[in-house]
Image: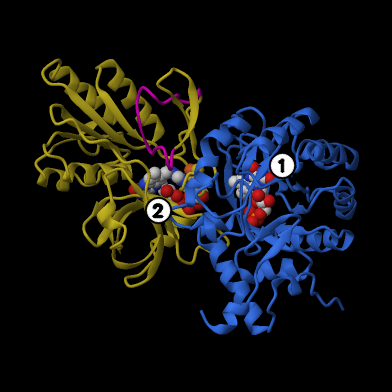
Chain colours: A blue, B yellow
């Protein structure tokens, strides 16, 4: 490490949560921790965001659950998961071995369930923040059903807020006419940060069989194809609020991440790119450091929102 | 994870190619039945890696045997000697240790012969290979198995080689001749329809049947939950398991097949 490296400060705060660097892994793309731990030292991540869980174990959708499209993939996993207590028992002891904040992505099919999951995780030692999934397009109830209406979104945010002292991060749907309204509601509900974007509702048809490829018929598009859409939404959301914004959507390299940061994001999450190259989060961290060196920026926080709009 | 250099790449027979990769960090760890998740060079606008069973492995190289079936495998045929290829592996559970008191029966459909060859080459004893395909050019590796001293039984749907019919017909004929003579253990890799039929034989004859499933994969690492299969648990309950991580090999009795046969192997 050179002297100038020693000076580089990549740390950033998300509410009370202090991240050693601004690069997380996105929910649903890095499992619950053990899956990639042999390849990637979890302690090097800014935060580990685990796959969405509800109160009870959940089966998810029938396969096929994923299909590749140019520049991305469409998934309809349907939030398969072990349930809140199952997660705590099975994965928290593992995750505790690492020096990394654990953010749990939560969902429910009723307002009450969101509150109950939040309470269970609040009581568990080893959970550092809750990301509220009100934006998953792949479940019939819950998810996006709550996230595309400002009032129901606000109800969920308040319910979770009431049930935990942990930092609360609603994950916004890109599928709304004015993202700023949802960002503002989150701030008004006392949320500590917002994250965006979740996948974009999408569909793929097999023209030979004349059937949708996914059993769920529709799914969510992720990957590089959605990155410019996400940059625009992050830019609008960040302009609307003072709480930190965590940005995701198609990050493949440091350049993609820095776009988000200049647009106003305080942190970023790598999603689909983990499937292509599991080292992506680490190369993004290095690439951000490199960029800071090249641009003589010593503190990461000085980059946030440093966009020059014509 | 490793970046491997292509040591050689050649056609094995019409439609099938053999790719030899220098992978000194992966190859020595390989157990038969495991696979590598390979990023196909120049596959632009497509993100996902492609899974391939390990066909041969020594201290520093591993070989895959593949068929061109789509965009990715088509492009793979153009990879040249000396080129770099990114690999994740070895992945998956692999076949269990064979029971040496049982005669091993290997059942292969098309490129499904690949992991079975590695298994046979490391077995303490020989047995019978049942290999099936649509036509004679889909019959692979019969020479290699014969060189290892295996009895090779061939079936083609068009009758252009071996008996005419499905590979399970050959298996049934063997079972009828050997009724009760010797306990057997089955190891199979091929399309779902074949695996299901083989699994039924295993149950009927009270043999263990180890089946290697072929599911579309995302991450290959157990993280994305794209590749799930319903598996009967020891307590009788049924749970999703991940073909990439908990499989690809499951015992015939554990697998809960779909109602509809979604056989999109070829
Ligand atoms: C555990 C395992 C071992 C395998 N071993 C071999 C092998 O030894 N030799 C060999 O030739 N093939 C093998 N396959 C199948 C091989 O992975 C597919 O043929 C290949 O992914 C097709 O890619 P494509 O781009 O040419 O096809 P496309 O149809 O263009 O691919 C589109 C998408 O479907 C996926 N896909 C398509 N067919 C399959 C399939 N049958 N299985 C899994 N994913 C598929 C691709 O990964 C891709 O995401 C194996 C599959 C699995 C799961
Ligand atoms: C396979 C898969 C599973 C996902 N599961 C979840 C989930 O459980 N909860 C959630 O909030 N988002 C989930 N997402 C969305 C991602 O966290 C992320 O918001 C989205 O994919 C955009 O980022 P990307 O383009 O980098 O993947 C999932 C995405 C994928 C591809
Ligand atoms: S391919 Fe991702 S879990 Fe199996």
Q: Residue at x 55, y 41 (%)?
A: A92
**Label 2 Cα neighbours within 10 Å, binned few <14 / some 14-19 / many ≥20:** some
What is the quadrant of the N terminus of chain B in the image?
Answer: bottom left
**Label 1 Cα neighbours within 10 Å, binned few <14 / some 14-19 / many ≥20:** many
Q: Nearer the viewer, mark 1 or mark 2?
A: 1
Q: Nearer the viewer, residue B169 or A304?
A: A304
Q: Chain of mark 2?
A: B
Secondary structure beneath label 2: loop
Residue carrying label 1: A136
Q: Looking at the rendered structure, which numbered label has been put on residue B68?
A: 2
Q: Nearer the viewer, residue A180 or B162?
A: A180
Mark 1 to mark 2 CA distance (whole Å): 35 Å
Q: Position of residue A198 (x, y in %)?
A: 72, 49
Q: Is residue B234 visible?
A: yes
Give, as a single range, the part of the protein colored magenta. B243-259
| Vertical position of residue B172 compared to residue B2: above or below | above
- Asked whether residue B263 is drawn in magenta, I would say no
What main secondary structure does the magenta stretch of the protein show? loop
Does mark 1 have its CB less than 8 Å from ligand 2? yes
| Vertical position of residue A302 compared to residue A218: above or below | below
Q: Looking at the rendered structure, which numbered label has been put on residue B196?
A: none
Please indicate whether residue A72 sits to the left or right of residue B251 in the image: right
Residue B265: image quadrant is top left
Q: Residue at x 33, y 25 (%)?
A: B199
Does mark 2 have its CB less than 8 Å from ligand 1? yes
What is the quadrant of the C terminus of chain B in the image?
Answer: top left
Q: Nearer the viewer, residue B32 or A33?
A: A33
Q: Position of residue B191 (x, y in %)?
A: 38, 36
Q: Residue at x 15, y 16 (%)?
A: B179
């Amino acid at each position: 490490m050179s002297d100038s490296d020693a000076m580089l400060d990549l740390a950033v705060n998300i509410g009370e949560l202090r991240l050693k660097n601004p690069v997380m892994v996105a929910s649903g793309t890095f499992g619950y921790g053990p899956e990639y731990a042999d390849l990637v030292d979890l302690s090097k991540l800014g935060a580990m965001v685990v796959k969405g869980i509800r109160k009870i174990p959940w089966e998810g959708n029938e396969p096929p659950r994923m299909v590749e499209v140019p520049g991305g993939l469409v998934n309809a996993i349907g939030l398969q998961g072990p349930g809140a207590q199952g997660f705590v028992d099975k994965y928290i002891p593992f995750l505790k071995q690492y020096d990394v904040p654990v953010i749990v992505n939560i969902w429910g099919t009723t307002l009450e369930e969101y509150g109950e999951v939040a309470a269970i995780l609040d009581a568990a030692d080893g959970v550092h923040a809750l990301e509220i999934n009100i934006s998953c397009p792949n479940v019939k109830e819950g998810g996006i059903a709550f996230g595309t209406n400002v009032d129901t979104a606000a109800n969920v945010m308040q319910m979770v807020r009431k049930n935990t002292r942990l930092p609360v991060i609603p994950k916004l749907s890109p599928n709304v006419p004015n993202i700023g309204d949802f960002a503002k509601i989150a701030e008004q509900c006392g949320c500590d940060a917002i994250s965006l974007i979740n996948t974009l509702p999408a569909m793929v048809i097999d023209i030979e069989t004349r059937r949708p490829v996914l059993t769920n018929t529709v799914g969510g598009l992720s990957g590089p194809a959605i990155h410019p859409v996400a940059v625009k939404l992050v830019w609008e959301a960040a302009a609307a609020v003072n709480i930190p914004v965590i940005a995701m959507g198609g990050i493949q390299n440091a350049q993609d991440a820095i776009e988000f940061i200049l647009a106003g994001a305080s942190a970023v999450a790598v999603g689909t790119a983990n499937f292509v190259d599991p080292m992506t989060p680490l190369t993004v961290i290095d690439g951000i450091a490199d960029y800071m060196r090249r641009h003589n920026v010593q503190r990461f926080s000085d980059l946030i929102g440093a966009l020059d709009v014509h | 994870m490793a970046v491997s250099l292509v040591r050689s790449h050649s056609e094995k027979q019409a439609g099938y190619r053999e790719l030899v990769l220098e992978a000194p960090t992966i190859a020595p760890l390989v157990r038969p039945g495991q696979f590598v998740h390979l990023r196909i060079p120049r596959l632009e606008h497509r993100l996902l890696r492609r899974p391939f069973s390990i066909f041969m492995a020594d201290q520093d190289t591993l070989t895959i045997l593949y068929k061109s079936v789509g965009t990715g495998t088509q492009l793979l045929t153009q990879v040249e000697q000396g080129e770099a290829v990114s690999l994740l592996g070895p992945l998956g559970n692999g076949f269990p240790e064979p029971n040496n008191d049982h005669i091993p029966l290997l059942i292969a459909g098309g490129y499904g012969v690949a992991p079975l060859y590695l298994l046979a080459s490391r077995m303490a004893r020989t047995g019978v290979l049942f290999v099936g395909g649509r036509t004679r050019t889909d019959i692979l590796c019969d020479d290699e198995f014969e060189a290892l001293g295996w009895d090779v039984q061939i079936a083609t749907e068009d009758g252009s080689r071996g008996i005419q019919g499905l590979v399970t017909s050959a298996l049934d004929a063997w079972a009828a001749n050997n009724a009760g003579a010797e306990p057997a253990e089955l190891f199979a890799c091929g399309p779902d329809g074949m695996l299901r039929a083989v699994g039924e034989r295993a149950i009927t004859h009270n043999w263990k049947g180890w089946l290697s499933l072929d599911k579309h994969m995302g991450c290959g690492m157990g993280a994305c939950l794209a590749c799930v299969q319903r598996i009967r648990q020891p307590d009788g309950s049924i749970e999703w398991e991940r073909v990439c991580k908990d499989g690809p090999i499951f015992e015939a009795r554990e697998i809960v097949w779909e109602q509809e046969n979604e056989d999109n192997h070829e």
